Image (tube, rainbow, N blue to C red):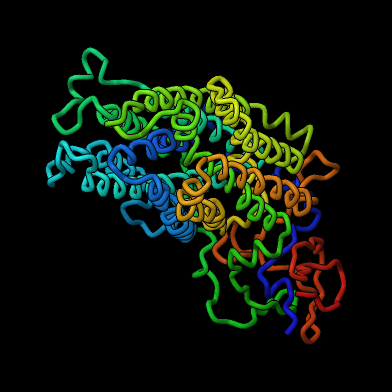
Amino acid sequence: PIRSPAAMGVMAPPSGGSAAQHKAHDHRKAWTSAGLWALASAQGGVSLGFGLQYALLTPFVLELGVPKRWSSLLWLGGPVTGMLVQPLIGRLSDSYDPSTGNRCARLGRRRPFLLAAAGVCCLAQLLVGNCVDLGSFLGDSLHAPSRPRAALLFVIGFWALDAGCNGVLVTSRALIVDVVPEAQQLDAFAAGTLLQGLGLAVGYLVGGLSATNLPVIGPLLVTTACGHAGGCADVRFAFIVALVVGIASAALTAWVGTEDLTAAGSGKAADRPANEDTVHDSEKGSMTRALEPLSPLDVVLADEVLLGVFVVTLLAWFGWIAAQIFQSHFVAEEIYMGSPDPTSSANALYVDGMHSASLALVANALLMAGASSGFSKMRSMLGDRGLWMLGLQATALLLISSSAILAAKSKHGAWLWLAALGPPYAVQLTLPYSILASRAPAALQGQLMGYLNVAVCIPQLVLSLVGGHVAAMAGTDVALFALGAAANAVASGMCWRLLRTVDAGGHATTKAPRYAAVEGSAEGYKPPQVIGVAGDTETHAQTSWSGGLCGRRIARSNDAQPLDI
């Protein structure tokens, strides 16, 4: 049977509703720049932990005796936990009703989950920083070339850290959508990207420090099992810093991110009949169908732009995951000609290469933070689609240029290459979430933010399973960078194709209608305007939006013709 917009749960904007008028009626409080920074601070805290992972994970597990062929499998923690945790926490926080009056109710929908995820991060950082000592306590030999128990504990801690970080990110982004006016949401997401850049910079800087040489702190870090060799004590110091910063940043976000508890609980499905097929309007003498809750898949397939956001994100991250897993190792082994084996005479060159890569990644993160501050101006010039395409094309060019750097064995070139990846990474961390926030229904913001992370996790899952084998067979990490460059080139074409309608006139963003009638929406239940019913067709007033793939035309204007779904 032909389904109407009412049956789909989709609704056009209120009559007379331009995007500008809707923004003018946004009753959420305006934020200062400092307030937006404080609200997004949790993203900076978890990014410091990510920076340490990117800089230290692969080299450290190699030093624990894990073969290079299997080292990339350790990165499975990111995609597996991300694909499960972000959609789950997004859905739980979307449906959480703070009006129940339980102990966490006064914190609103998002903050209880944010604080719980931050607690998981803290425990995981303690485990990672002390894995060598714990492994020795459980039976690892101090003189063996491998430490299997320490490696196992490191992997468990790493997976738990990924799960906690994913929980903090999805709740932080959903909290921004809940409490920040739409007109300021790009600035809020850009502030989050800026702080993520600073967090990565601190992570890379701390990861490159030799803390054991510090006069007071150094002796406290060194133990019999975790000594100077291999940088074990430096890893411990790095994760202690991450622990302190993570606690402080999550607490700051929870403190300033006060939610409107009345609005958060106003749209629950319990306020409406649960199993009715029709709802009669006695005043208008008309009949409307009870709303069916939209699934996230329905929403994405019904909007070509949202579908484009997911597809482009999926393709783009093949390049970014390849870089994040192997960039430091590429510089240390292939450019500096070092060896990750602590007993090798070339290990000193490897450590030098790792320190150089860490400093380059500091510059990378600072450039990333600086680029995010200019997003509003760049978007006014290029539009969302143009700015995203520019970032994708720059990423493809930089990744393929790694072959020339390898051929020249240029240490300075490798340093500049790592640093230059910062600005396009800032684009990738900001625009997908900004576009999603402006177009997705309020009741599904948390879930869709989580599912967008699934598009990030799929490339990580693939490269974690086969990336190490591909690099080993090719004899160079450049093979993976080349595949990532090709994926970003394809992503640029898909961005041009699927995001054609995201910008009006190429500049100002055109916002798709909110799905205000979605069950459970924080905006409340507003029945669609139905003038009459004739069989399986309904006459709808003030409906104007159509879009999407798969032959879906969701709304028609002032007619009584069947709608094509």
Q: Quadrant of the N terminus?
A: bottom right
In this rendered view, identify the residue nearer to me: 557 or 489. 489
The location of residue 187, given as percent across then percent down, is 62, 34
Q: How many numbered marks, from 0 up? A: 0
Please indicate whether residue 24 sits to the left or right of residue 531 in the image. Answer: left
**Residue farthest along the top direction in this orientation:** 215
Q: Is residue 164 left or right of residue 454?
A: left
Judged left or right of residue 328, residue 221 is left
Q: Nearer the viewer, residue 156 or 225?
A: 225
Residue 422 in view: no
Q: Position of residue 253 (x, y in %)?
A: 43, 37
Residue at 23% x, 19% y is 217
Picture quarter with the C terminus: bottom right
Q: Percent x, y for residue 162?
A: 39, 47
Image position, residue 523 (x, y; %): 60, 56
Which residue is painted at 70% across and 72% down in the image?
6
Identify the residue at horizontal 70%, vertical 44% (top origin). 23
Residue lying farthest to the bottom in this orientation: 535
> Does residue 507 sit above or below 204 in this rendering?
below
Q: Is residue 389 rendered to the left or right of residue 433?
A: right
Q: Pick whichever, 270 or 188, lies toward us.
A: 188
